[in-house]
Every structure is written in structure tokens, then in C-alpha cells.
Amino acid sequence: MRALLIFCLLLCAGCSQNNLLTRQDYQKSQQDFMGGDNEKALLNFPRGREDGDFITTMEKGYLSLLQGKPQIAGLQKQAAWQENQVRYHVSREARTFFYVRTPEDYYPSEHEVIWLHFLLGWGYAQQGKYADACVEARIASDLLTQPWSPSGHFDDPAMRLFLAGLWTMCGEWREAQVDFRAAWFMDNSLAWARELAERDAPPAQLFIVLGGPGPDVVWNPEFKANPLRAGRRVTFQLRGRKSPLSITDQNGVLIDVHLSPDAAKWYDRHLARESELDETIQDSAYGGKAAASGTYAAGWIVATTGAGIIVAAGGTALGAAIMYYGKTTSAVELGLLVAGSSIGWGIDMAQKGYEQSTSNLKKELDPSIHYRYVRYLPEYLWMGWSDQPVAFPVKLSTPSESTEIRQPSVVNGVAVTIAQLPDSRQTSCTYRMGRGTSTVVTAPDADGNCPPEPDW
């Protein structure tokens, strides 16, 4: 019965994986998003699989809000599913976390659950439903402040800063002060957040600029005590530059801007908080897949190596026969040529078979290709404010990109503007060699910048 149960789990895992989106499915949308075109990123968003699920609903909701066109019906449905579903679990490995299980059996990270309510509150504020926006802010605040564990509950200064902005949008400055103060308490370098917390009245204009395209997932196998779990190990790599940002209004007035901490701790915690039941199921699925893929790869290596040996041996025998029966200088030369070529072909066949098999095996077992997480979320934010009215349009600029904001996102006593810049690092640098068609690809430097083009 146990073997039958594991077999059924493997079958289910294999079937369900075919219905999940992969990194390749997101490629076009991600390129548009990193290029700063949120409209095209949503237009080219993968469809047909995972429609209506938590991940895709969050991602499309974020892209729509960035365009000022809130599509929040799906977010409302997800929030309704999650009502009264939050639970927490204590383990020796992971201290204490809270968990939510979605209808499609996905366990969102804590930061993803909180961002669901951020996005809903932001969407309600864009629609002028400020009371509803305050309700979502309250839910997010409760999730950040609940004492799931005295030493291990989830809290984060960047999230507190965005939450303060959300409270400002819905007209609750006193609540915003609490979160500005909490952000400073967690990170004392945020003296500017403390300054905002000590103000009795909000500024006339508040700017929140979301930065970074969201992290990428990289396979990082470390085969230690548990080879199944170690083989599934991945890491998150943030792709934002955290560039200096300037905000300038139509009259040339420059607004001071401050940068928040980044989201690295969100994803560290994400990797630390998998449930034990989920681990068990993944162990079974990954182990079966590893065994099946390994057997197939080994068989293909044996087959291609065997074929290479046959080609080499057969060619050598043919070359020897030519030399033996020809008994001339030209026959000897021809025999040596046939034998040598056959050995080369055989070795090449075996080598290509090995390389193809190991490459296919890596693709089969690399968990980063199918890893499930919400891709479209910011990595950090910039915040600035003004006590005087600001003349729109306003220009946002970093050393590598700029955009123009035509009007505030929300005006409710305070004009709050939420914008976004990808501020993404280069993943590769491509140079064309003179007038030819050949190109050279190199890696960027540590700051994500491409070196100067070579003098061809």
C-alpha cells in the first residue's frame, strides 16, 4: 500500500507539473517588464495554465495596478479563500511561520500573503473606496504584528514603509506614523522614516516608487545528508540595481528621495518555511523523477557509447582488411585513413551522447525551471515627499532609465503617487564586431554595468 501511495503521488506530480507555468512561459512578458513596458508585459502574460490561481492572479493584479487600471476581482476572490485560513506551525528547523493553503494546493510565502492585501488596498484606493483600502491595510498590519513567535514572526521594514503609504492613501496618518516608526525601529539607518513618524500632519505630496524586477531562481544543489532535498535546493537572486533616483516636477523642483532595504530577507524566509507535509510529497516526487531520469540518461549514455565503440571497432576492422588484402602503399594509406576516421567518429558519437544525456538530465532535475513563486513584486522602494504642491507631470530618473508621471495615483487629503521602475541589472552584454554579423557576449560587472565596447 505504501508503494502504491508513492506511485500515485508520482503520477499526480507528473500530471500536475505539465499544467504549471515554467520560466520559459514567462520569457516574453519578463522581457517587456524589465524593459519598463508594463502594458506589453500584461499583454504577453502566459495564459491557458494556472488561470485564476494565486500566483497568476497576484502577478496580473500587480501589472494592472502599475498601469492605474486596477483589476482586483481575482484578488478579492483569493482574499475570500484565505479568510480564516491562516494557521501557524512550529518545528525545530524553522521556528514559527504562518501558512495559507490555496485551493490549488499552493502555500504562498508570508510576504506574498501580505502583498495580496497591499495590492487590494492599493486597488481600492485607486477606485476611491478608502474605507475598503483601510480594511486591507488593517489585515496586512495584523499579519505583520501577530506574535506567531516571540523570536520568529515575520516583519520587514520595506513592507512597513509601503503599509505606511497605504494608510496615508486611505486617510489614516496616525496609523502611518506607527509603521514609519516600526520601520525605523527595525533598521536604524532609516532616520528619514523616524522623521516622518514624528510629524503631526502628513506631507502634501508623498511619492512611493517601486524598484527592481523581482528575483530570479537559480538551481543550487548541495548534496549533503538528504540528497533529495539538497538536489532541489534553489536560491533567489535579486536583479535590481538600487540606483540613485531623482524626482523632478514640471517647474524643476527636486524632491529628496530615500531608499528602503531590499527584499532579500523575504526570500530567505520563503526558503526556510516549507511545510513538512509538502516536503514529504516533494521528496517522493523528486526522488521518483530523479530515478527515472537518471535511468533514462544512463541508458542513453550506454547506447551511444556502445554505438560509438561499434563504429570505431568496425571501421578499424575494415581499415585492417583494406591494408591486408590491398598490399600496396595506397591501400595501406586508405586503410589507416578509414581506421583513424572510424575511431574519431566513434569517440565523437560517444562524447555527444554523454553531453546530450547529461544536459537533458540537468533540465529534467533543475527545479528552478518549474519553481512556483510570485514573480512580479518589487524588491525595494524609494520614498520622497513634499510639503508644497507639486506641478505635474513629474519625471523619475535613474542613471539608466526614466519615466514620466502625469498625475498622482490617489488624492485623499494627501496626494500619493505610486510608480515603478524596473531598475534591473544587465544579465549579459552583447557587442557586434565591426560591420560583420558576429557578436561577442560577456558578463556585466558587479554593479550590473556593461564594460565599454571594445575597439575592434
Image: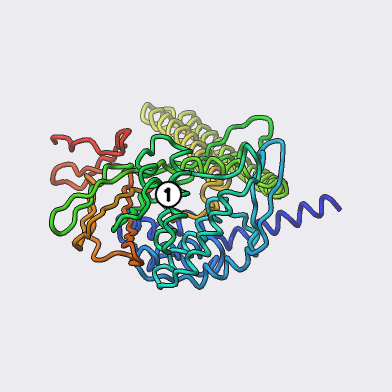
Give the image location of residue 319, x and y in percent.
Answer: 47, 32
Q: Quadrant of residue 107?
A: bottom right
* Residue highlighted by disc 1: 161
Asked if 223 appears above or below 424 in the picture, the reply is above
Instruction: Give the percent coordinates (x, y) of residue 115.
Output: 50, 56
The residue closer to the viewer here, 285 or 59, is: 59
**Element type where label 1 sits in the image:** helix
Q: Residue furthest front?
A: 200
Q: Which residue occupies 25% across, 38% down?
A: 450
Q: Eyeballing the image, is 109 above or below 441?
A: below
The residue located at (57%, 66%) in the rendering is 78
**Image height of 172 relative to 47, above or below:** above
The residue drawn where x is 50% and y is 69% is 132
Of the 4 image quadrants, the one containing the C terminus is top left
Which is more toward the observer, 4 or 376?
376
What is the basis of the colouring in this image?
A: rainbow
Q: Nearer the viewer, residue 312 or 294?
A: 294
User: Residue extending furthest right?
Assistant: 1
Please report the residue visible at 43 percent of the width from the left and 40 percent of the height from the top.
184
